[in-house]
Amino acid sequence: MNSTSIIVFQARRKRDCADRALVLRAVGIPFGFQDLGDGWTLVVPDEFAQAALTELRSYEEENTSFNHKPPPPKILPIGKPGLIAYSLIICAMLPVGLKGLFGQSFWIAGRMDSTLVADGEWWRTVTSLTLHADVGHLAANLFFGLLFGALTSQALGSGLTWGATLLSGILGNLLTTWIDGPGHLAVGASTAVFGTLGLFTVYEWARRNKIKDQYPRSYRYRPVATLLAGAVLLGFLGMGGGDESGRVDVLSHLTGFISGACLGALFAWLRWPIGWTEKHQQLAGGGSLLVVTVAWAFAL
């Protein structure tokens, strides 16, 4: 550096100057170091001084914001009882649904039939979620149901998660009935599974979007990544699964996801699970089991 060099930063350690030199190098501003004996300075040519100070000021502001970022949200337990209950119900109902029990055809009594649902047999929107066509169909919904359920439980709590999962499956089936009309036959938990995915996707996006202004500018577009991830999973996984005839039931996957997404937006607006106690979570989880039991009672 020549005699017209301007000091733009000074520190006791050369490393602090070097960190800021990287900022200047990234935008093409020439720089140099000067050893003062008891410290170091970062200098730039006079004509680059204003631009360098602007870049360094922005760097300091972003670091200050990052160092004072809000604490991460509380991570709740994954809720092993809820995961176990989900696994037991859909696994136990596979042979029951396919072979029947006590002389009853659970398949005919519980499958999703939009014609009968429109005629008032509401319970089919619930019972069909517990039936599966074969082991492969069951395995897919078991794996992804447990995965999405565990992730969402850490954000919302186990009881609220499984209550919303069941509700999104019911709403998804009702929406499918309204859109597709009579003649839609289906079985499987995938409507509810995609509901959980939609729930988690939108809830996390809304939560992160609320606090994005507390982070550096470079972090403020990251909430969109949550929506993109959910959309990619919906597109990739939603092409599989199937209804009773083996066809891909894309409509039910989509309606389940939309229903869960709406619930996720609602929960974020209500700031749930803030204010929810362990008792509330237990009531929500127990209520879900009760709804399934009552639905099957009506079906049989």
Image: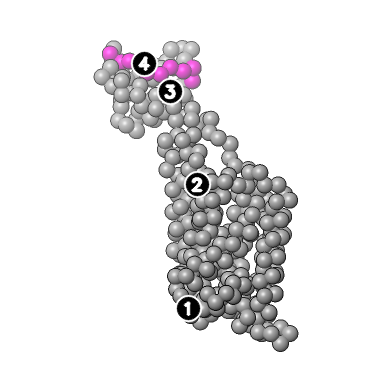
Q: Which residue is mark 1?
A: 182
Q: Nearer the viewer, mark 1 or mark 4?
A: 1
- Please tell me which of labels 1 and 4 falls first in the chain: 4
Q: Which residue is mark 2?
A: 206
Can residue 272 be seen here? The reply is yes
| Three-letter amino acid code of the residue under disc 3 | Cys
Q: Residue furthest bottom?
A: 103
Q: Is 67 contained in the magenta span? A: no
Disc 1 from disc 2: Cα separation: 36 Å
Q: Residue furthest left?
A: 47
Q: Residue at x 48, y 43 (%)?
A: 209
Magenta residue span: 4-13
Occupied quadrant, residue 83: bottom right
Q: Which residue is mark 3?
A: 17
Disc 2 from disc 3: Cα separation: 39 Å
* Magenta span: chief secondary structure: strand
Q: How many other residues sit within 10 Å of disc 4, few (<14), some (14-19) or many (≥20)?
A: some
| Three-letter amino acid code of the residue under disc 1 | Pro
Residue 273: give x, y in percent of width and height: 63, 47
Disc 3 from disc 1: Cα separation: 71 Å
Occupied quadrant, residue 116: bottom right
Q: Is 5 contained in the magenta span? A: yes
Q: Which residue is mark 4?
A: 7
Q: Report the front residue among 17 and 35.
A: 17
Horizontally, is 14 left or right of 2 in the view?
Answer: right
Q: Report the front residue among 112 and 139.
A: 112
**Which corner quadrant holds the C terminus?**
bottom right
